[in-house]
Image (spheres, rainbow, N blue to C red):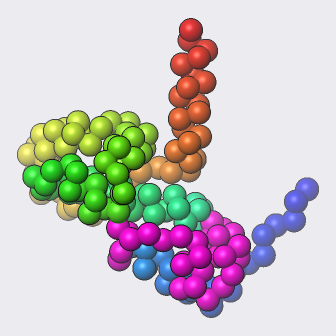
Amino acid sequence: MASPLPLQTPELLRRLLRAKDRMDAASHEDWPVERLARVSHVSEAHFARSFKQAFGIPPHRYLLTRRIERAKTLLRDTDLPITDIAFQTGWASLGTFGRTFRDITGESPGSLREREQAVASQLGRVPACFLSAAERPKLTSAVSEKRRRASDDTNETR
């Protein structure tokens, strides 16, 4: 049986929260583990391991969640072109944005925009924070794992 992970100190948790807050404030920027570790004043390996232990998901998946949440908000609340939304939320290419968005949400950005704008007129005055929390992407597995499972399911049905 594996030994349990050691408890994290309040100081380490504050440092991890500092990095998480920086990602939240600038999710459109690149946040490699090296940069996050510098913000937290710990080694890269220690940061990655501690972040996952503290928040339940690796830093990259957390950043993807924040980017997708921001993109969903812009798609719902603005008429900006999807290309502009992709670049504003930190994606380097429209293709990567669209593919990752579809893998995580199950629909294309254009389809989500149509559906969200139709639903928004029906929901009335529900606070946006409640809607965001209810629709937060569940990234407990990597996008590549989801693609692999989907291709395995497709191959089994043939």
Q: Who is closer to the viewer here, 152 or 138? A: 152
Q: Quadrant of residue 2?
A: bottom right
158 lies left or right of 128: right
The quarter of the rendered structure image containing the N terminus is bottom right
Considering every residue shown, the one lying at the far top of the view is: 158
Q: Is residue 29 above or below residue 113?
A: below
User: In the visual, does 30 lie left or right of 54?
Assistant: left
Query: Could you tell me which residue is drawn at 53 percent across and 62 percent down?
Result: 60
Percent position of residue 19, x then y: 50, 80
Q: Position of residue 143 (x, y in %)?
A: 52, 44
Q: Kindly identify the residue that appears in the image at 58 percent across and 60 percent down.
A: 57
Residue 74 position in % (x across, y down):
20, 57
Which of the 4 image quarters holds residue 102? top left
Name the residue furthest right.
Answer: 1
Residue closest to the eye, 118 or 88: 88
Is residue 79 located in the magenta-colored stretch of the structure?
no
The C terminus - image quarter: top right
Q: Magenta residues, as a range?
A: 25-54
**Is residue 152 in sight in this rendering?**
yes
Residue 37 lies in magenta, yes or no? yes
Q: Main secondary structure of the magenta part?
A: helix
Residue shown at 57% from the left, 21% from the top = 153
Q: Is 78 rendered above or below residue 7?
A: above
Q: Is residue 131 visible?
A: no
Q: Nearer the viewer, residue 54 or 103?
A: 103
Residue occupying the point 55% across, 66% down: 59
Task: Please indicate whether residue 51 sits to the left or right of residue 23 in the image.
Answer: right
Residue 101 at x, y = what percent? 37, 45
Q: How many marks?
A: 0
- Quadrant in which residue 133 is drawn: bottom left
